[in-house]
Image: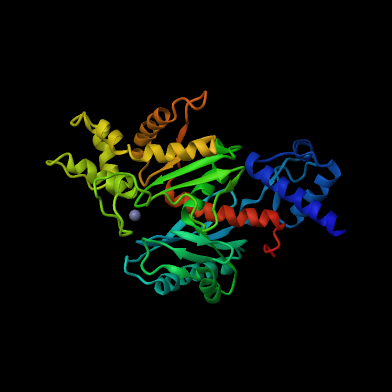
Amino acid sequence: MSSEQIRKRRSNEEALLRELHFRGMLSRSELSRRLDIRKSSVTNIVTDMLERGILIEEHPEAPRSRVGLNGGAMRTLTAYLTPGEIRVSEILGDGTVSGIAREKTSRGTLPSDLLAKTAQMLGAELKAARLARRPMIGVGVAVPGTVDPRIGRGIHAVNLRQWKDIEAGRILEAELGIPVRVENDAHCQLLGNTWFRTDLVGYRNLLYVSLQEGVVAVGMVGGKVLSGKHFAAGEIGCLRAGSEGRRCTCGKSDCLQTYVSTPALVNSLNRKRPGRSFHNVAELASAVAGTEDPDLLGDVHAALEPLAPIVATMTAMLDPDAIVLATEDAAFSDLVRPLLESHLNREMLGLYAQAVRVVVADDVEKATLRGVASVLIRRAFRNGFEMAG
Ligand SMILES: [Zn+2]
């Protein structure tokens, strides 16, 4: 094949794999029709991928059987490095998370120790997978803060001690002897939602708003996550958002995260209630569901006020299909969703004919690990599973 033919074949293969990922099993004719690829080309690609075990047939003996992805041939090994814990999990091509190994760390743990521990955990999983003959198509790690994924460098993370210009990818590769992809955790969370959630299929423009210990808003345009020149696109946590003089961990005052990160929201509400002390947003959510404090919901709404103009500006810029909202607690996300919607619709003064739509994100930990998997799977789709071997 000429290089042009090879390029064409690769792009057809990728389109076919993506179609099967998002639509489930399809027949060869359906694939040909949906993708506008000649039937003979589809048949060639499918035959080759069946032989290699990348695809499976619904009814192997029937000549016109529908075909689908072989989830088991798309195993990835993923890790999520957080300030308090390292999580490692194997993820299948269909998003199945097969158990999560955890190791506690402390906020004082140095980058070298965090990475040594991560390498140890990944190494143990790889060894077990090799013994059980479960080949992986890739290994990846999500880390907080700004990340240059091209070279696997952690540029800066406020919540990890001394995490500055850390060559995480290179260090892990040296330990494990195989390539390791390093990605920003919030980007992974957005990708974990768009790649595996059937209700978000077809959404190419999204704004992912995460209120946790930090506050981040990641944009996706035309299916691509926005990173920016310094890989800092969406780092809104330290924008000025008030004038109460609240101190931020960054050294400045009145950063957005001192008002609407989930610990900050809990503190604000506790301050208004001398007799009461919530420990986290889960407790807050269950108190709102109860009846003993009828003002609580209104106070949560008021506490979210500083978030609205910033997210409204980003929404006006991106014009997204939807805003995907994440917090560490599902019940709290459900509570905040309509409050944020009402703030945004008020801020945007009817900019769109339809109201802004906010949907609740998948569980953050699961979405992060699945997001890492999606990066590795999409790369395998692009390069025709060269690494599958
Ligand atoms: Zn700050």
Q: Position of residue 330 (x, y in %)?
A: 37, 41
Q: Residue at x 58, y 68 (%)?
A: 130
Quadrant housing residue 307? top left
Q: Position of residue 147 (x, y in %)?
A: 50, 61
Question: Vertical placement of 27 versus 116: above or below?
Answer: above
Query: Image check: 148 left or right of 22?
Result: left
Outermost residue toward the bottom in this view: 174
Ligand 1: quadrant of the figure: bottom left
Q: Residue at x 40, y 73 (%)?
A: 113
Quadrant housing residue 85? bottom left
Query: Image check: 304 left or right of 322?
Result: left
The one nearer the camera, 184 or 103, is 184
The one nearer the camera, 191 or 307, is 307
Is there any visible trace of residue 142 in the rendered image? no
Q: Quadrant of the C terminus?
A: bottom right
Q: Residue at x 38, y 29 (%)?
A: 342
Outermost residue toward the right in this view: 1
